[in-house]
Image (cartoon, coloured by chain):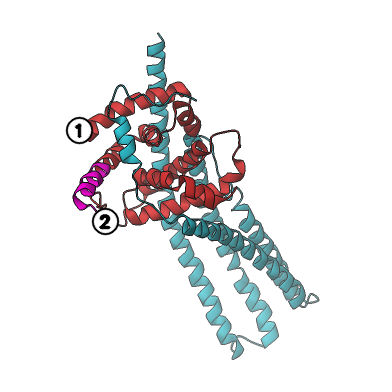
Chain colours: A red, B cyan
Amino acid sequence: MDLSAILSEHGAMLGRIVASYEADPALQQELMQEVSLTLWRALPKYNASGSLKAFVARVAQNRCISHVGKAAAAPRRAELDDEMVADSPHPEESLSREQQRQALLIAVRRLPLPLRQVTTLALEGLSHRDIADALGISENNAMVRFSRAKTLLRDLVAR
Amino acid sequence: MDKKPEKTDMPDFGDLASLWQEGPAMDMSALARRTRFLGWRTRIFAAFEATFCLAMVVFAIFALDWSRASHQIVGAFCILFSLAGAWVAIESRRGAWDVSAGSARDLVALQIRRARAGIRYMRLNVLFGYASLLLIPLGYWKLVQDLGGWRSERMIGLHAMFLFLISFVIGFHVFTRYYTRRKQAEIAAFSKLLQEMSDEISAAADETADEAS
């Protein structure tokens, strides 16, 4: 299986998952690199009968959790910049949209880890079954977590 | 197809998902190239370390005069030391090229085990470092015989080399203390994370049981 093709298809999702775990842009790049490397090593274990998207999401989630554990033990190397704005041909519209996206990203980052896992995958459009597969939990557990995550996310976005 | 996450409780979740999926683009082909490079670099480093150690064994076998007692002792020490080094180079990376695609809790537990293994590896290297200091009296024994005395001009460079070896081993020991503290902090953070995940799973299981009853 070709890593380049997988990254082309699911790279954007990986980037968003990484961004939900790491706010520092420089560390995001490093983490994205590590996720890709982990994915490359994990590809031989992929069972073609399962969802590739769920598999890729699982590998990314797991690698990001490792990062969270290490980041908690290490000092920050840079100040976090949660107010970054992208360049765009329609500045006002894009600025508003980008600010909303940043607000959502910040809210997702504030969720407790188990709820954040479920939320990022649900936002990527994965079904409860795929979320359960990706996280190694039961479908019921995924539904309960998603319900709790939505309630908390609503509060965080509203702030 | 399985059911998608509900949108009824929070009508704007679909909008949030659309918003979420507008993330910035990345250069994926460059990322793929870099990923392959890093993977092969890890393998090359491991192969280099093991090969270097085995080359030291070969060097010891062919470069020493095995008919002399001092050479026999230095040679035997070098061979055992290098073989142990080759074993550590491979053993310390056992499993490092694999990846756990299992549950997040398993992975966190694996990270804790790896951090502990990292500490063990460094401590083992410190022991190897101090063991290598045994080369100093052995080396002097052999070299004094070969070069004809402590004050020979050719011994000056060797005095400097042994001094550097002692400084390096002590410096490495100091660094290992820093590394160990950092890894222990990492283990504490992962343990906390593991506890948080276990608590969340218990809470979700309780809620599921409540809903069922």
| Circle 1 residue | A158
Question: Could you tell me if residue B120 is visible in this image?
Answer: no
Residue placed most toward the observer, B189 or B39: B39
Callout 2 secondary element:
loop
Q: Residues within 10 Å of mark 2 (few under 14, many from 20)?
A: few
Judged left or right of residue A92, residue A66 is right
Q: Amino acid at mark 2?
A: Asp
Name the residue at the top extreme. Answer: B213
Instruction: Name the image quarter holding residue A158.
Output: top left
Amino acid marked by disc 1:
Ala
Q: Is residue A23 above or below residue B172?
A: above
Along the viewing direction, whichever of A78 and A145 lies nearer the viewer? A145
At label 1, counting other C-alpha atoms closer than 10 Å, the crowd grade (few under 14, some 14-19, many 20 or more) is few
Q: Quadrant of the C terminus of chain B?
A: top left
* Labelled disc at residue A87: 2
Mark 2 → mark 1, Cα distance in angstroms = 26 Å
Is residue B54 placed above or below A96 in the rendered structure? below
* Residue for point 21% across, 52% down: A91
Query: Relative to residue A43, is residue B71 drawn left or right?
Result: right
Q: Quadrant of residue B143?
A: bottom right
Q: Reading the chain from its start, which is encountered first: label 2 or label 1?
A: 2
Residue B207 percent coordinates (x, y): 37, 18
**Residue A73 appears at what percent x and percent y?**
37, 48
The chain under label 2 reads: A
**Front in this rendered view, residue A31 or A122:** A122
**Residue range corresponding to the magenta coloring:** A86-102
Numbered tag placed on residue A83 in the rendering = none
> Residue B114 appears at what percent x and percent y?
52, 46
Residue B96, position as x, y percentages in the image: 57, 50
* Residue A14 counted in the magenta span: no
**Residue nearest the viewer, comparing B120 with A115:** A115
The local secondary structure at tag 1 comes to helix
